[in-house]
Amino acid sequence: MNRVFIEIGKLGRPHGVSGEIKYIPIEKNSNLLSNIKSLYIGKAKKLLFIEFYKKGLKPRIKVEGLDSPELVKGLINSQVYIKREHFPALTKDEFYLSDFIGANVVDSRRCLLGTIDSYYHNGAQDIVKLSTGIEFPLIRGAFIEKLCEKTKTLSLSISKEDILV
């Protein structure tokens, strides 16, 4: 499923007195905002022009025209999106999880378990959430047998009976 806007994180609390706001990426080690000068905020996907800062593990965003903590407070907990076309190109063996939203997931006996609704990072690995409520870690070799980008199918190496719901 090709989507124009991809959620990449959310905004946290204001930082400092000049209107910077903390950025919480979905993918902890993501560098997607490093070269981005604009992004989209909230369900309405309001276009904002930004500067991106990263000191250590604490990324922050400065929104053009919002120069105080009071002015950015309305952005707290807003989802952050960028256009899919702004994602960096990938090598042959790489993929973006966001490209697999809506993909079918089958077990080791090729029984359909559901479609991918979303994913999140739990601190150790990415977790995939299915339309049927099933969640599992995205660990190639342990759970994941094959990802097929062409057919948008993720094949698990375990059966449905092996999954605790």
Image (cartoon, rainbow, N blue to C red):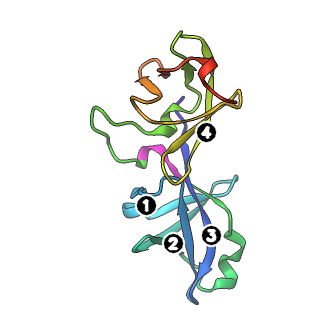
Q: Nearer the viewer, mark 4 or mark 2?
A: 4
Structural distance between the alpha carbons of marks 1 and 3: 16 Å
Please tell me which residue is depicted at 69% across the width and 53% down the height of the picture. 44
Q: Are marks 2 and 1 in contact (CB under 8 Å)?
A: yes
Residue density around tag 4, few if under 14, some if 14–19, many if 20 or more, within 10 Å: some
Residue for badge 3 = 12
Label 3 residue SS: strand
Structural distance between the alpha carbons of marks 2 and 1: 9 Å
Label 4 residue SS: strand
Please tell me which residue is depicted at 35% across the width and 47% down the height of the picture. 88
Along the polypeptide, which appears first: circle 1 or circle 3? 3
Where is residue 68, by image quadrant?
Answer: bottom right
Residue for badge 4 = 118
Residue for badge 1 = 33
The magenta segment is 81-85
Name the residue type under label 2: Ile
Front position in the image: 11 or 137: 137
Please tell me which residue is depicted at 62% across the width and 69% down the height of the picture. 12
